[in-house]
Image (spheres, rainbow, N blue to C red):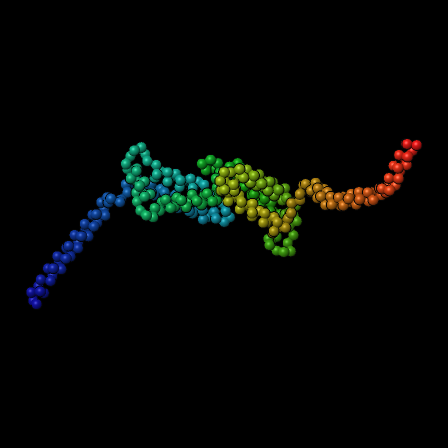
């Protein structure tokens, strides 16, 4: 028993030194370049993609309501696509660039970079932002700028003519809003209709719809105009519509009246009996032979 107690401290010291050696070896191993580690240039590309994704995510969330995705986030969306292109694009025949793309995009089952890229592209496509922008997302199109300008003017007209009234009260009178903002609202509605007609010639289902910014802005304006303010736009073609409708409604009356008169006229025509016709013909024959 005494021998065991004497030898135990030595064994403990050996175990402690062995643990320290393993710890030093692990630290040295982590500090070295592992097979799965990234080159400095590749790590820089990953950091650039991460920062652009964070900026785009924040922009999308901040622009959720009211919807301003396309007009506010096209810069950051373009930055994300450019960062992904930098990762996937192989510079010449460099093996380093190929290994970087392979490590970032295909090295694991999750493929987080590919998943994030597909999510942003799908969101952008479902929002139809391409219909509001110029080619390659360089900026807003001229028709979109015109529509947004009229939209802002319409909202300013609403606000200016409310004159301190609380929106939503049943007893409120919005006559001033309806009268003074009628022209601006009609212009906005006309531009929106023209944009809808132009988008109907698109090849895909997504391209046949306007971008979410324009649709949401028009829906907000129409709800305010018709439901909140209870305004109505007088139709300029009211007289022709009334005339055509009256003519169509009057057609059955004309038809039945003409049918009645025609049948009454037929009743007045007198037909000679067949016996009278036969006797008359017999008299003519007798006179001819006499």
Task: Identify which residue is drawn at 30% across, 38% down.
Answer: 98
Viewer-proximal residue among 84 and 280: 280
Q: Is residue 102 left or right of residue 207?
A: left
Q: Indicate the position of residue 207 as horizontal and vertical percent values.
A: 50, 40
Residue 250, quarter of picture = top right
- Dividing the image into 4 quarters, which one contains the C terminus? top right
Q: Is residue 64 left or right of residue 254?
A: left
Residue 142 visible in image: yes
- Dividing the image into 4 quarters, which one contains the N terminus? bottom left
| Residue that protrudes farthest toward the bottom in the picture | 1
Q: Indicate the position of residue 122 as horizontal and vertical percent values.
A: 43, 44
Task: Identify which residue is drawn at 22% across, 45% down.
Answer: 32
Task: Identify which residue is drawn at 73% across, 42% down.
Answer: 247
| Residue that protrudes farthest toward the left in the picture | 3
Viewer-proximal residue among 209 and 140: 209
Q: Is residue 236 left or right of residue 220?
A: right
Q: Is residue 179 left or right of residue 99?
A: right
Task: Identify which residue is drawn at 20% across, 47% down.
Answer: 28
């Amino acid at each position: 028993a005494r021998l065991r107690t004497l030898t135990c401290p030595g064994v403990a010291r050996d175990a402690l030194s062995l643990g320290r050696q393993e710890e030093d070896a692990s630290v040295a191993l982590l500090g070295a370049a592992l097979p799965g580690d990234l080159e400095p240039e590749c790590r820089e590309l990953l950091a650039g993609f991460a920062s652009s994704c964070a900026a785009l995510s924040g922009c999308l969330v901040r622009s959720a309501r009211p919807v301003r995705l396309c007009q506010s986030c096209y810069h950051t969306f373009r930055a994300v696509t450019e960062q992904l292109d930098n990762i996937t694009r192989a510079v010449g025949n460099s093996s380093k660039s190929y290994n970087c793309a392979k490590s970032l995009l295909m090295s694991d089952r999750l493929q987080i970079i590919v998943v994030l890229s597909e999510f942003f592209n799908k969101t952008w496509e479902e929002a139809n932002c391409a219909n509001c922008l110029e080619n390659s997302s360089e900026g807003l199109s001229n028709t979109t700028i015109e529509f947004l300008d009229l939209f802002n003017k319409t909202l300013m007209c609403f606000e200016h003519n409310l004159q301190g009234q609380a929106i939503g009260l049943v007893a409120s009178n919005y006559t001033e809003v309806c009268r003074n903002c009628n022209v601006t609202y009609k212009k906005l509605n006309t531009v929106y209709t023209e944009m809808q007609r132009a988008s109907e010639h698109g090849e895909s289902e997504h391209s046949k719809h306007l971008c979410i910014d324009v649709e949401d802005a028009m829906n907000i304006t129409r709800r305010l105009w018709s439901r909140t303010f209870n305004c109505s736009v007088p139709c300029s073609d009211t007289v022709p519509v009334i005339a055509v409708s009256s003519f169509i409604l009057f057609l059955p009356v004309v038809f039945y009246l003409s049918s009645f008169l025609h049948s009454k006229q037929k009743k007045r025509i007198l037909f000679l009996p067949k016996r009278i016709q036969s006797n008359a013909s017999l008299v003519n024959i007798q006179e001819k032979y006499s």
